[in-house]
Amino acid sequence: MAAGTSQLRRKLFILDARVLAALDGLARERGVTVNELADEALRHYLKKHARPVTLRDALTQSARTLAANDPGRGRRKT
């Protein structure tokens, strides 16, 4: 999440020590925090399962699912 775009909320995750060590090492290699790695991973996971991340994404996705917005799907004028 970009700072200033929305309220930040906290969520506690319990991770295996080996997983946490691997994440910490990856974060140090990339020069980011473990929180930033988790944020990126969760965004990718939501995208993979076609779940909107932002309100704008949700509105865009809902507009695309309406048949009225699909070209060539309406009634033909005769």
Image (tube, rainbow, N blue to C red):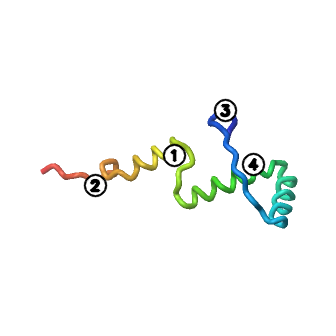
For the residues carrying marks 3 and 2, which lies nearer the camera in this image? Answer: 3
Closer to the camera in the image, 45 or 14: 14
**Residue situated in front as seen by the camera: 69 or 71:** 69
Element at label 2: loop
Report the residue marked by disc 4. Answer: 36
Q: Which residue lies under the disc numbered 2?
A: 73
Residue 21 versus residue 10 in the image, above or below? below
Residue 38 percent coordinates (x, y): 72, 54
Q: CA distance from mark 2 to mark 1?
A: 23 Å
Among numbered discs 1 and 4, the one appearing first in the sequence:
4
Q: CA distance from mark 1 to mark 4?
A: 20 Å
Disc number at residue 34? Answer: none
Residue 9: quarter of image: top right
Q: Nearer the viewer, residue 16 or 36?
A: 16
Extreme residue in the left direction: 78
Structural crowding at the residue carrying mark 1, measured as other residues with C-alpha within 10 Å and reported as few (<14), some (14–19) or many (≥20): few
Residue type highlighted by circle 2: Arg
Q: Earlier in the sequence, mark 3 or mark 1?
A: 3
Residue 67: % across, % down: 32, 52
Q: Amino acid at mark 3?
A: Gly
Residue at the disc numbered 3:
4
**Distance between mark 3 and mark 1 Cα atoms:** 18 Å
Amino acid identity at mark 4: Glu
Circle 1 — which element? Answer: helix
First in sequence, mark 3 or 4: give its number: 3
Other-residue count near label 4 (Cα within 10 Å), few / some / many at <14 / 14–19 / ≥20: few
Residue 78 coordinates in the image, percent (x, y): 12, 51
Task: Indicate which disc, 2 or 1, sits on the residue closer to the N terminus.
Answer: 1
Q: Secondary structure at mark 4?
A: helix
Q: Which residue is mark 1?
A: 57
